[in-house]
Amino acid sequence: MQSYPRDLIGYGRRPPDPQWPGGAYLAVEFVLAYETGAEMSVLHGDAESESVLTDLAGAPAVPGARSMLVESTFEFGSRVGIWRLLDLFEARGIKISALPVAMALQRNPAVADALIAGGHEIISHGWRWIDYQTVAEAVEKEHIRLSVDTIATLTGQRPLGWITGRPSPNTRRLLTEEGGFLYDQDCLNDELPHWARVGDRHSLVLPYSFETNDNAFSGRQGFATGEEFFVYLRDAFDVLYREGRKSPRMMTVVVHDRLTGRPGRAAGFERFLDHVLRHPGVWICRGIDVARHWMAVHPNPDGE
């Protein structure tokens, strides 16, 4: 039992006080994913087309050929949805954690320019938007390097945060070996940041979410309308806000340009943004803001 590599206990019933700036009850991080041009495609050297996180219910991967409608659902995000969502955030003065896949950002540098001009953080979402579960370690390591170098070239600064989305058992160790990252968010197990052991060191992990996330729009099997998305986000926010008066927490909200960037869904998301802004005691933050704050208030156990 002593060598079991998982932490099933966490903070338990007495989580630490995050001491959010201004005595906030709740830290809210908005994450905007940008992935078009890096998904599975024979154009990218893959054996089949993409089959997940699109509006095409049950569209299977197409072996050895392009899937034109699937490609077009992704293209909506890069052509229209990204700008609609950035406008929603910028109209409210909200700085976000942008989550571009490096290959995707390379194919549309105007998005990189807009993110930098808007004061948004750019977190690396990897080199490709693929599942790394069975990718060879040497390939994943090279993809990490490619991602860092590409984002640094496009934006003038290397990413300090990382979210693969579909990591491998090697990902966190490889990030630690690469160096230069302050945190990763490839974790769904908490509502506060925590230090995870990686070999003989510790690495800062920020909470991520697949439920306060528009991925449930995919294939029309989850949220059917923008109103349903709004209600779910609102209810999650309200519970965390109420509990946060006693024990402050963090909420991560994730949207994709090709999903929530659609007008009917954007309407529901816009209502949620305004709901959040009506509440005092909320710290709207980027991942890097949370990481730096946590490192100052709850330092690395290694003393680094």
Image (cartoon, rainbow, N blue to C red):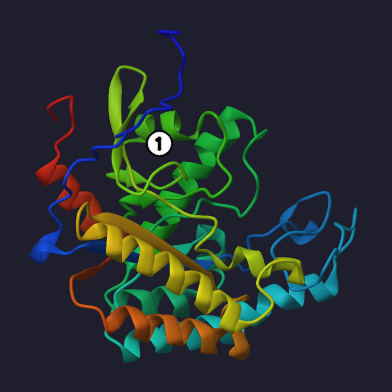
Return the residue nearer the eye: 153 or 164: 164
Residue type pointed to by label 1 = Leu
- According to the picture, the residue beneath numbered tag 1 turns out to be 175
Position in image of residue 303 (x %, y %): 12, 27
Q: Is residue 294 above or below residue 101?
A: above
Instruction: Give the left or right position of residue 247, taking residue 161 as reference.
Output: left
**Residue 55 lies in quadrant:** bottom right
**The N terminus: image quadrant:** top left
What residue is drawn where x is 41% and y is 26%? 7
Count neighbours of disc 1 (C-alpha within 10 A) and say few if under 14, some if 14 to 19, many if 20 or more: many
User: Regarding mark 1 in the picture, which secondary structure is present there?
Assistant: helix
**The C terminus: image quadrant:** top left
What residue is drawn where x is 20% and y is 62%? 25
Position in image of residue 232 (x %, y %): 52, 70
Instruction: Give the left or right position of residue 34, taking residue 70 as reference.
Output: left
Instruction: Give the left or right position of residue 38, taking residue 191 as reference.
Output: right
Position in image of residue 270 (x %, y %): 45, 86
Position in image of residue 62 (x %, y %): 89, 58
